Image (cartoon, helix red, strand yellow):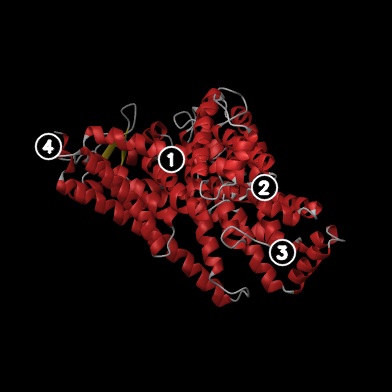
């Protein structure tokens, strides 16, 4: 049974039925994306995110043609829906499913890429935008509206720098979903850990950076820089602590009350609600919800998950993964449909050269900024590591660079937050910034996303995959500090082949292997103090009666 095109147009034009039809349309499209994505999984080029984007674009085209461009609300990107409903499951599942040993072994490098790398990219994009305004004015000669806008920017450097910084933060938010769908966590543990960890920290850094910029005046002074730095560190630290606190609270409650004795539904429901509570509390206190819910997920997987029944463990693991997968597919579908929202394009349709010029300039700055951040951070990391196996190879650097070229819904949401009011704008300058951001998101995901599979296969040969640095096997062979099953408190440690070496002092270990040393002493503290209170796997197990 099928609907005629005029019937579709009539249904969509009924205001009371629009919400129902929007939900029905999106649910049907997400289902279709999952089916088609599964069928295309083995192809050389396609992946789930590109499939969802293509579906969104095709659906938007059909709606526009059948309604003569009159229906726009169904295509409109809602930043509240994105930040409140779609983003939390993705970030929480990222923390919940992460391999903590790999993540924290490479924690310093991940933060170098996620924080320092993002700041480098932000700086290059912001400086590039402010310095290229004169060139854009020259290119846009003849377009009076844009000439006036850009000349106002040029004559008011404080305001120009303010907008440049905002755009820099918006375009610094990467989307590594395409690359993560191709990388194998078992075959390339280090690379997957770096790309995955950097993606989460990068999104959090970009949003914190964007929010911090909005709080300060357009004129930069030494006091402003100090205030900005303090605000940035404040948001980062308190957001992390809040996530840890909520995660520990959930572990303590479930461990003490033993919900599993009577109902597994209650403990599953409590885990889901406590996870979401961490996100909304961060929003309530104007902190970073991404960082909060991410670290809440890590803490819950380390403590809370071990305090629930076996059936609840299976349920929660698959529930969080499923919600994350549906949200990711929905977001790419949503962005694809919003790309053809006619309201914005009608405003800029009289100046196609303007959109092309701005989009091309911004895309070039994204490429340069990403390259500068990845290769400079990799150089510093390799400089600090003496062992060849601890260095990030050139092909791995190229893969990390490529993984961060895609821009996603975070950039679109921040652009809407900055340049629209309730999703609408009538100002040509704002419309151009929105359409340029959408153009970059579409181009990077479609073009770069289609090339991701062949590029990763070209860069990562099987022989190189097996020589991943910081892998558990190589670490246990080379670092007596992290050797499995060895008595680290003894004076002598056996390292392969019966050869014994004297254990170095704590200070020496801290200087030579800071991450490994912190990990070792954290494990001692965790087993002695944290697990008896909050539960968890390992040496201190949850009570046996929980499982009955």
| Disc 3 element | helix
Q: Earlier in the sequence, mark 4 or mark 1?
A: 1
For label 2, the residue is 440
Query: CB of mark 3 within 8 Å of CB of mark 4?
Result: no
x and y, in percent, of residue 156 in the image: 72, 74
Q: Earlier in the sequence, mark 2 or mark 4?
A: 2
x and y, in percent, of residue 278 in the image: 35, 55
- The residue that appears at 60% across and 76% down in the rendered structure is 221
x and y, in percent, of residue 529 in the image: 20, 51
Rounded to the nearest whole Å, what is the CA distance between mark 2 and mark 4? Answer: 55 Å
Q: Earlier in the sequence, mark 2 or mark 1?
A: 1
In the image shown, does 349 or 366 lie closer to the viewer? 349
Query: CB of mark 2 within 8 Å of CB of mark 4?
Result: no
For label 1, the residue is 324
Q: Residues within 10 Å of mark 3 (few under 14, many from 20)?
A: some
| Disc 1 element | helix
Disc on res. 201: none
Q: Quadrant of the C terminus?
A: top left
């Amino acid at each position: 049974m099928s609907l005629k095109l005029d019937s579709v147009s009539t249904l969509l034009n009924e205001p009371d039925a629009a919400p129902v039809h929007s939900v029905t349309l999106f649910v049907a499209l997400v289902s279709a994306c999952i089916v088609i994505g599964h069928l295309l999984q083995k192809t050389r080029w396609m992946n789930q995110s590109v499939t969802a984007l293509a579906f969104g674009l095709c659906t938007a085209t059909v709606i526009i043609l059948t309604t003569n461009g009159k229906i726009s609300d169904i295509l409109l990107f809602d930043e509240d829906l994105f930040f409140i409903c779609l983003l939390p499951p993705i970030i929480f599942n990222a923390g919940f499913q992460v391999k903590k040993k790999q993540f924290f072994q490479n924690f310093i490098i991940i933060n170098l890429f996620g924080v320092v790398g993002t700041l480098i990219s932000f700086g290059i994009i912001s400086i590039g935008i402010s310095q290229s305004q004169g060139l854009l004015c020259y290119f846009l000669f003849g377009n009076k509206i844009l000439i006036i806008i850009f000349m106002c920017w040029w004559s008011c450097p404080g305001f120009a720098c303010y907008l440049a910084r905002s755009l820099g933060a918006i375009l610094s938010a990467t989307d590594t979903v395409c690359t993560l769908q191709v990388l194998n966590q078992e075959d390339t543990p280090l690379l997957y850990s770096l790309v995955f960890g950097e993606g989460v920290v990068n999104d959090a850094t970009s949003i914190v950076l964007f929010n911090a910029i909005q709080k300060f005046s357009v004129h930069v002074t030494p006091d402003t820089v100090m205030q900005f730095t303090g605000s940035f560190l404040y948001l980062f630290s308190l957001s992390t602590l809040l996530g840890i606190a909520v995660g520990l609270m959930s572990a303590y409650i479930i461990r003490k009350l033993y919900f599993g004795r009577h109902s597994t539904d209650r403990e599953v429901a409590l885990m889901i609600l406590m996870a979401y509570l961490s996100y909304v509390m961060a929003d309530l206190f104007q902190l970073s919800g991404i960082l909060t819910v991410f670290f809440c997920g890590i803490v819950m997987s380390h403590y809370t998950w071990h305090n629930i029944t076996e059936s609840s463990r299976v349920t929660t693991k698959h529930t969080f993964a499923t919600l994350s997968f549906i949200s990711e597919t929905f977001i790419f579908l949503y962005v694809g449909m919003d790309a053809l929202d006619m309201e914005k394009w009608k405003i800029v349709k009289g100046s196609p050269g303007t959109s092309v010029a701005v989009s091309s300039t911004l895309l070039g700055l994204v490429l340069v900024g990403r390259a500068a951040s990845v290769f400079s951070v990799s150089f510093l990391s390799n400089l600090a590591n003496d062992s060849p196996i601890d260095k990030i190879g050139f092909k791995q650097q190229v893969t990390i660079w490529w993984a961060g070229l895609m821009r996603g819904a975070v950039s679109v949401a921040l652009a809407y937050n900055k340049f629209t009011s309730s999703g609408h704008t009538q100002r040509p300058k704002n419309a151009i910034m929105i359409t340029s951001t959408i153009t970059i998101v579409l181009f990077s995901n479609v073009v770069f996303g289609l090339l991701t599979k062949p590029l990763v296969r070209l860069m990562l040969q099987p022989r190189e995959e097996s020589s991943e640095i910081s892998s558990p096997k190589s670490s246990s062979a080379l670092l007596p500090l992290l050797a499995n099953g060895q008595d680290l408190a003894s004076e002598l440690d056996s390292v392969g082949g019966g050869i014994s070496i004297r254990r170095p002092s704590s200070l020496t270990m801290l200087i030579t292997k800071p991450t490994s040393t912190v990990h070792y002493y954290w494990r001692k503290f965790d087993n002695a103090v944290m697990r008896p209170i909050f539960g968890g796997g390992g040496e201190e197990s949850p009570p046996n009666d929980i499982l009955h």
